[in-house]
Image (cartoon, helix red, strand yellow):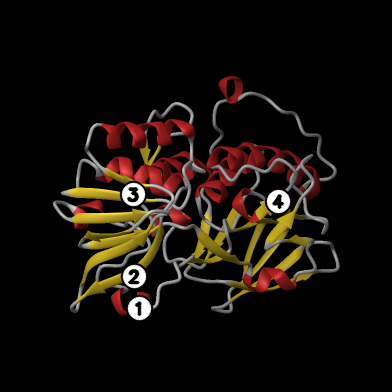
Amino acid sequence: MISTDICIIGAGPVGLFAVFEAGLLKMRCHLVDALPQVGGQLSEIYPKKPIYDIPGFPEVKAQELVDNLMKQIEPFKPTFSLGERVDGLERLADGSFRLTTSDDTIIEAKAVVIAGGLGCFEPRKPVLENLEQFEGKGVAYMVKDPEKFRNKRVVLAGGGDSALDWTIFLADVAERVTLVHRNETFRGAPDSAEKVFELAQAGKIDLVLSANLKALSGNGHLNAVSMTTKEEEITVETDYLIPLFGLSPKLGPIADWNLAIDKNAISVDTFDYSTNVPGIYAIGDINTYPGKLKLILSGFHEAALMAQSAFKHVYPDQKLSFKYTTVNGVPAF
């Protein structure tokens, strides 16, 4: 059995940073993640994707950010149960929690922090008749290794940050990049959208707006994508189609923990990101509240406020004295 102050469910960037904030307050953390490695979506789906909105880093690769977070929390000696899913949670007589994983690991913790990103997630797929025929044979839902697409023809579809960022990145890698979006404007960051428009104007990529994917064709491997605009049907010869329509969240066993759920997300109090169950917090993409922004940056902020509140829950008889790390430094366990 593992005994700890805080059990963090989810070892993505927000869960990892929560270890740092808890560690500053001398609280020990144990992390559980269903994936076999830390990093969450960053490591599993797009380890080499550039991220532009982390303070102090004009650009940082997703895996590099994860590696830096691991270095940052090393002094606090967190422990991990990776490749395991939390299946059971019960409150003990003293108010603490007992969690049971899919591998029958038992964890007892005074507080629980759910930082599971989107929970159990799967990519949203376009509605195309023969889509499954080309999955793994030209259709990919993530970019794990950009070098796979070097000197290849690539069609990306989507209008969010991932579609924009990968279009910008692959413009210097692929032989030709075509970005297809169903609207005239993008949901992603305005700066990224502007860069995409500049690449299109310079002739470095092809941009097809107000268009919908219609059909795929090929003989054993994808070789063409057809799409329709308001005026015409267009067929683009390609080696790969990468639909980036986001992820469909599934809470999994968490949905049965009597938490307040709103559209597959956990409702929290923005005072400290606590849930309706005392001692359980939710931070990162898995939570929801008015004005919520699904940014890593926002998750870091939520982790900091959560830790201050969790300290009072874990050590109700101790006085919390907040000091800047520039004054105290980073304590080691």
Helix, strand, or loop for circle 1? loop
Q: Which of the two discs, 2 and 4, sits closer to the camera?
A: 2
According to the image, label 3 marks what residue? Answer: 179
- Whole-Å distance between the Cαs marked 2 and 4? 36 Å
- Label 1 close to label 2 by CB (< 8 Å): yes
Q: Is residue 281 left or right of residue 62?
A: right
- Whole-Å distance between the Cαs marked 1 and 3? 21 Å
According to the image, label 4 marks what residue? Answer: 288
Instruction: Residue at 29%, 75% (x, y): give it.
Output: 134
Quarter-of-image position of residue 157? bottom left
Quarter-of-image position of residue 308? top right
Q: State which tag comes first along the sequence, 2 or 3.
A: 3
Q: Amino acid at mark 3?
A: Leu
Instruction: Residue at 85%, 43% (x, y): give it.
Output: 317
Q: State which tag comes first along the sequence, 1 or 3.
A: 1
According to the image, label 1 marks what residue? Answer: 130
Dot 1, how many residues are within 10 Å of its Cα: few (below 14), some (14-19), or many (20+)? few
According to the image, label 2 marks what residue? Answer: 215
